[in-house]
């Protein structure tokens, strides 16, 4: 299935049914009075987060969603039936905003979360509501109100603990294959990942984290070059970035430190908050270097890269150093999570009667 992480849709809630003005006309009931019922409410539209979905492809071609209108009221005090609500299932991590104003409507960040995105119209009042001691035969009734109509922008931001950052062919897909069960495409010729891949990394039976591999960035990405920039939103929810650098490029004129700094500059241009996230440097493909050269190459990379919190040297193709890196990541994630209070929560409304 092709990966779609953006969509634009229009949602139209149902209009409320109209109230009616009718009168009882029964043989043995003289002056029966008003009997017009209210109209039914229009159907509303809700968004539901579903962890079984991983793409917005359902909203790529179907763009308009319309809920059912409420029925009009009837005679003999009959109220109209309300319109059926509509439920739109979306992947966990979908951000819903107003297309024109940019207002955030919902962030579906957990499975089962439901939010109202278009309110159905209210049903109109029948003439039974307008009778009084001085108006025994009212002919007034009100129409139903229109349902809410909105144009929405949907953006999927995958939920991952760790994001992989780097140039195409730095070894990000190979790394995620080495530490998880994800199987992104890898080959012995240069190419780039076309869509994000997620992998679950298990430190042990009860401890795990999620890694996101996105298409590689290239210089000029902030100005629209390459695929990587359009997928950078998937790194915004992560708590740690791994900057994977090819320490043994095929081109002898290539400078890994200069290329790595260029990627950091593109990241800063795209989103300063993303640039400020905790970031570790991972020197990959050390298996391609003679052991006597590895320390010198790594020192040169660190000197040219600049300050970094932590660094690792690995070989994703044969797994060297990957186990130590995954345990360090697991410890960092556990330390970053806020402590869970063991005290029961109290709510003000529980003490009010």
Image (cartoon, helix red, strand yellow):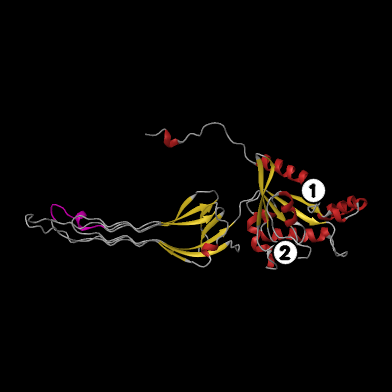
Residue most extreme to the top: 343
Residue 35 is left or right of residue 162, and the answer is: left
- Residue 40, x across and y down, in percent: 30, 57
The residue shown at (52%, 62%) is: 58
What residue is shown with label 2?
A: 192
Q: Please state which of residues 311 and 307 is positioned toward the viewer in this rendering.
A: 311
- The quarter of the picture where the N terminus appears is bottom right
What residue is shown with label 1?
A: 311
Task: Quadrant for residue 257, please give it.
Answer: bottom right
- Asked if residue 83 lies in the magenta stretch, the reply is no
Mark 2 or 1, nearer chain start: 2
- Residue 66, x across and y down, in percent: 41, 63
The residue shown at (72%, 62%) is: 217
- Residue 114, x across and y down, in percent: 47, 51
- The quarter of the picture where the C terminus appears is top left
The residue shown at (17%, 54%) is: 131
Q: Mark 2: give few (<14), some (14-19) or many (20+) Cα within 10 Å.
A: many
- Asked if residue 127 lies in the magenta stretch, the reply is yes
Residue most extreme to the right: 292
Query: What range of the chain is rendered magenta?
Result: 125-134
Residue 102 is left or right of residue 29, and the answer is: right
Q: Mark 1: give few (<14), some (14-19) or many (20+) Cα within 10 Å.
A: some
Dominant secondary structure of the magenta stretch?
Answer: loop
């Amino acid at each position: 299935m092709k990966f779609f992480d953006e969509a634009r849709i229009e949602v139209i809630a149902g209009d409320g049914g109209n109230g009616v003005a009718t009168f009882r006309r029964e043989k043995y009931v003289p002056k029966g009075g008003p009997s017009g019922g209210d109209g039914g409410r229009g159907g509303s539209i809700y968004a539901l987060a579903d962890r079984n979905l991983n793409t917005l492809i359902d909203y790529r071609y179907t763009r308009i969603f319309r809920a059912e209108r409420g029925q009009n009221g009837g005679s003999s005090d009959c109220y109209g039936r309300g319109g059926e609500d509509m439920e739109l299932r979306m992947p966990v991590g979908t951000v819903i905003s107003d297309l024109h104003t940019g207002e955030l409507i919902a962030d579906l960040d957990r499975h089962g979360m439901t939010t109202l995105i278009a309110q159905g119209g209210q049903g109109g009042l029948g003439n039974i509501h307008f009778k009084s001691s001085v108006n025994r035969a009212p002919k007034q009734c009100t129409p139903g109100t229109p349902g809410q109509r909105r144009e929405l922008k949907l953006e999927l931001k995958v939920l991952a603990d760790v994001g992989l950052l780097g140039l195409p062919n730095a070894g990000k897909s190979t790394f995620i294959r080495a530490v998880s069960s994800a199987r992104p495409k890898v080959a012995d010729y240069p190419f780039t990942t076309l869509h994000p891949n997620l992998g679950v990394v298990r430190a042990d039976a009860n401890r795990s984290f999620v890694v996101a591999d996105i298409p590689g960035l290239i210089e000029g990405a902030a100005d629209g070059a390459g695929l990587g920039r359009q997928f950078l939103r998937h790194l915004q929810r992560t708590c740690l970035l791994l900057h994977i650098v090819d320490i043994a490029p095929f081109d002898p004129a290539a400078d890994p430190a200069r290329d790595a700094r260029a990627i950091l500059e593109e990241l800063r241009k795209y989103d300063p908050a993303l640039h400020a996230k905790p970031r570790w440097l991972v020197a990959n493909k050390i298996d391609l270097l003679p052991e006597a050269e590895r320390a010198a190459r790594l020192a040169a990379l660190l000197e040219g890269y600049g300050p970094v919190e932590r660094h690792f040297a690995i070989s994703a193709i044969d797994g060297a150093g990957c186990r130590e890196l995954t345990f360090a990541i697991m410890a960092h994630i556990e330390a970053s999570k806020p402590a869970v209070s063991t005290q029961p929560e109290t709510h003000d409304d529980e003490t009010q009667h």
